[in-house]
Image: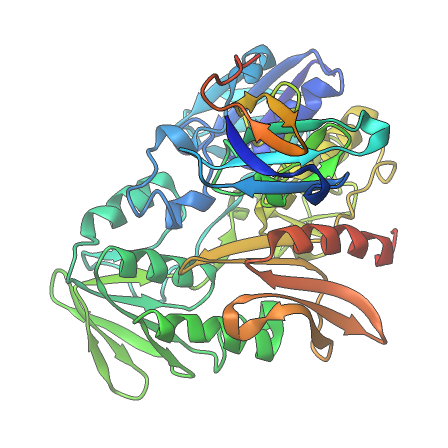
Amino acid sequence: MRTVVVVGASLAGLSAVRALRAQGYDGHLVVVGEERHQPYDRPPLSKDFLAGKATAGSLDLLGDQDEALEVQWRLGTRAVRINAADRSVQLSTEDSLRCDGVVLATGARARALPGGGGLDRVHCLRTLDDAVALRADLLPGARLVIIGAGFIGAEVASTARLLGLDVTVVEADPVPLARQFGLEMGQLCARLHGENGVRLLTGVGVRELVGASKVEGVRLVDGTVLPADVVVVGIGAVPNIEWLAGSGLVLGNGVITDTSCATNLGHVVAVGDCAAVHGERVEHWTNALEQPTVAAATLLAGERGRHVHTAAPYFWSDQYGVRIQFAGHRAPGDAVRVVEGDPEERSFLAVYERAGEPVAVVAMNRAKAFGRWRRQLVRHLPTT
Amino acid sequence: MVPVCNVDDLPHGESVRIVHTDIPIAVFHVEQDAGGGYYAIDDTCTHQDASLAEGWLEGCAVECPLHAACFDLRTGLPSGPPATRPVRTYPVLVQDGTLYVVVDAPAEVA
């Protein structure tokens, strides 16, 4: 293998580059990134960066040890087509990269509000540029309406409150984060908003944004209009895979792979937010960090299935000074049991159980115990 | 020199966070099979805000409880991503049954 093209220059793409080199690949490496920035860390964008406590420089993912990677960066450039026949990747600059292997790491983008375009001071939050633009509008006293009480919505609410804004969060589901945490723990998370002076409206959808040139309000399906100076739309993410249509790759809710990150094309692997392992897409930071090790091994071995990635999903969220951590595979119907601490004090650890066996763990402000449980959990997971 | 605790209060495999210093410091007592020594490093992970005293101690390394960045307790060096910068290390002394961290002279970062 003499040339590998990595499409996507965020955590998953960078991790793939590091893994390829660590596994002995010494050929040509090209990384194509749509954003003009070098790889940076996204989680702080809704937290310390938005709060003005972290600089853009502090988000840099590249360290001194990465100088030896010998990568050709093609930043500010989009890949527009993949050609299986001659194994090339065509770029928005109209040149084409011939290669022996491709790592797809194009990630996901913020889902847009249907019909929500065109007004000023309406933001989503996915990229550094998004965060810079949003930060400029988060002025003390301004009325912020956040659509969606998921992780982005909750973290932006928390940061905006800290910055002195008047914050309302609207969530279409009756209980926020219930899909991730279940009803009981979702309700606990929901209470953090009210306790910190943020209004949370649940079980009500958004009909439309109101305003002439800049946004002035958010009209709900029940007709209520919430006055707004700034709106943040945090209603999930969609994978960046449209450019792969017609490539011969099997696509679903992402690029379909097996647990070894192999796609149906022998020279193409997929990682991170754009990849759907057996149809299931994982949007977690830790997955983007770890999974590319397996993808690199699969690509270099030229053989699917030999190396597999089966780590328990792990994610965290910082909201209103509470650190929430979750690991494992929760399903509706699992029983949740607090095993230490006290939910009322926002310092506890709870285990999700199925047929008496732990399948997932959640904690608030209990990092040490959580780390122990997360390890224990691995032993209970299926190995395939 | 800053007192940490009685030696009996920090058994093998345990860690403690001290905050009566300019910046928080994490003190570890590694397992016998890893040499059994005491080590002190900056408590805050250089990657993002997390307390290393709450991390997972494995041999002479601690894994950050948030993102699994690993630091060598002896040198402060990260073993790989996501951390790219080392933590400072501090000498630990035992005197009359009390543990002390020497903070006025931070050890050179390796």
Observer able to see residue A282: no
Expressed as whole percent of the image width and height from the top left, the position of residue A56 reads 34, 32
Pick the residue in front: A380 or B87: B87
Q: Nearer the viewer, residue A64 or B99?
A: B99
Q: Quadrant of residue B86?
A: top right
* Residue A172 in picture, x, y percent from top left: 43, 78
Q: Is A227 positioned to the left or the right of B36 in the image?
A: left
- Pick the quarter of the image with the N terminus of chain A: top right
> Which color scheme did the rendering employ for the protein?
rainbow
Question: Vertical placement of A291 versus A22: above or below?
Answer: below
Q: Quadrant of residue A4?
A: top right
Tell me what residue is drawn at x 53 percent, y 44 percent.
Answer: A107
> Left or right: where does residue A228 sit relative to residue A232?
left
Examine the rendered structure and indicate whether residue B11 appears above or below residue B70.
below
- In the image, A91 versus A279, the foreground residue is A279
Q: Looking at the image, which residue sits at the far bottom?
A: A222
Residue A70: horizontal and vertical position, in percent? 57, 11
Q: Is residue A212 left or right of residue A198?
A: left
Whole-percent x and y of residue A178?
56, 74
Where A356 sits versus B76, above or below? below
Residue drawn at x 33%, y 33% is A55
Q: Find the residue positioned furthest to the front.
A: B96
Q: Residue at x 32, y 84 (%)?
A: A221
Left or right: where A134 falls relative to A272 = left
State the residue in front, A278 or A196: A196
Residue reaching furthest to the left: A212
Asked whether the viewer can see residue A107, the reply is yes
| Total numbered labels | 0
